[in-house]
Image (tube, rainbow, N blue to C red):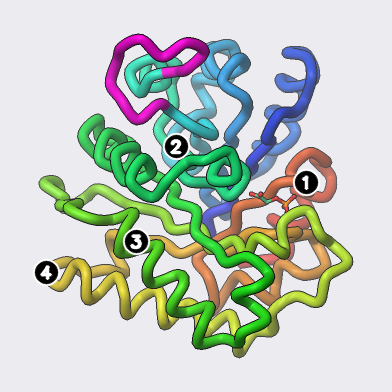
Amino acid sequence: MSILIANWKMNPDSLNKAELLFAQEIKNNTKHQIIICPPHIWLESLYKKYKKYIQKNIGLGCQNINHEENGAHTGEVSIKMIKDSGCKYIIIGHSERRATGETQEIINQKIQLTLKHKLTPILCIGEPMVIKQQGLQSVKNYLETQLIECLKNISLADKKQKIFIAYEPIWAIGNFAIQHLNQTEILEIKQSIELTLQNLFSTLNIHKTFKILYGGSVDEKNIKTFVGNNLMDGSLIGTSSLNPKTFQTICKQIN
Ligand code: PGA
């Protein structure tokens, strides 16, 4: 079973469209774990409408939370509000949020909070183009630092808890024309992430606790380069998740 996460970002622009998209994306799903991450504003309505489908292999996630449990944070949304809207997954540290100034320290606090409330963090990591141009070893070092800092002081009281790591090279996001990594490079990066996780969490079975996903211009033509067999455990999908037909085709491509 692969994990396919739809990151709708700031789309669609009405509840009607959100309901339609949600219904079409979860339709006929028996094979995969599908997690839909709509904008905050649609969460509660979607949860109420599709509650009976939101179970083990269909989940509701959100795209961000505040790093504090409550307080004077104008315009922000707290973890308890998110939890109350039926969300079980939270995207944390997406590069589009990091670009607004979100630090590794803040990301670390958000992960701690998410785990404390027994939800699953989807931690995004990924290098910018300048690091990619320095070669694969630089990419691995960059990701290692991100993981060390974002996962600092994290301990899992409940061994059943999961943490998803979404490797999304910044240069590949929303850039379908780019030359993507090949399977050998993907495998090498996955192994390097696993090694870092094993060093950080030596007492855990990291394959059980962590799921490693790929994201960045994933579509029905390239999904198999990244997901399946001993490649990544799933994908975080932006643009292609806004087209239900494409999303369904992606799901069908992998086993
Ligand atoms: P994309 O976005 O699929 O449009 O590249 C992925 C993401 O940013 O999560």
Residue 188: percent from left, percent from top:
51, 86
Q: Nearer the viewer, residue 207 or 82?
A: 82
> In the rendering, which numbered label is found on residue 229?
none
Please tell me whether mark 2 sits on a helix, a strand or a loop.
Answer: strand
Please tell me whether mark 1 sits on a helix, a strand or a loop.
Answer: helix
Q: CA distance from mark 3 to mark 1?
A: 25 Å
Asked if residue 72 is among those painted magenta in the image, a careful observer would answer yes
* Left or right position of 255 against 198: right
Q: What residue is pinned by disc 1?
A: 239
Q: CA distance from mark 1 to mark 2?
A: 18 Å
> Given the image, on which type of amino acid does mark 3 rest?
Phe
Q: CA distance from mark 2 to mark 4?
A: 25 Å
Q: What residue is pinned by disc 4?
A: 203
> Given the image, on which type of amino acid does mark 4 rest?
Thr
Residue 65: percent from left, percent from top:
43, 28
The answer to whether the residues at label 2 and label 4 have Cβ atoms under 8 Å apart is no
Q: Is mark 3 within 8 Å of ligand 1?
A: no
Q: What residue is pinned by disc 2?
A: 90
Q: Count all numbered tags in the image, as a single digit.
A: 4
Q: Earlier in the sequence, mark 3 or mark 4?
A: 4
How many residues crowd around disc 1 within 10 Å: few (fewer than 14), some, or many (20 or more)? many
> Given the image, on which type of amino acid does mark 2 rest?
Ile
The answer to whether the residues at label 4 and label 1 have Cβ atoms under 8 Å apart is no
Please tell me whether mark 4 sits on a helix, a strand or a loop.
Answer: loop
Tell me which segment is drawn in magenta: 66-77
The residue sitting at 59% across, 61% down in the picture is 168
The residue sitting at 75% across, 28% down in the picture is 11
The residue sitting at 24% across, 75% down in the picture is 198
> In the rendering, which numbered label is found on residue 210?
3
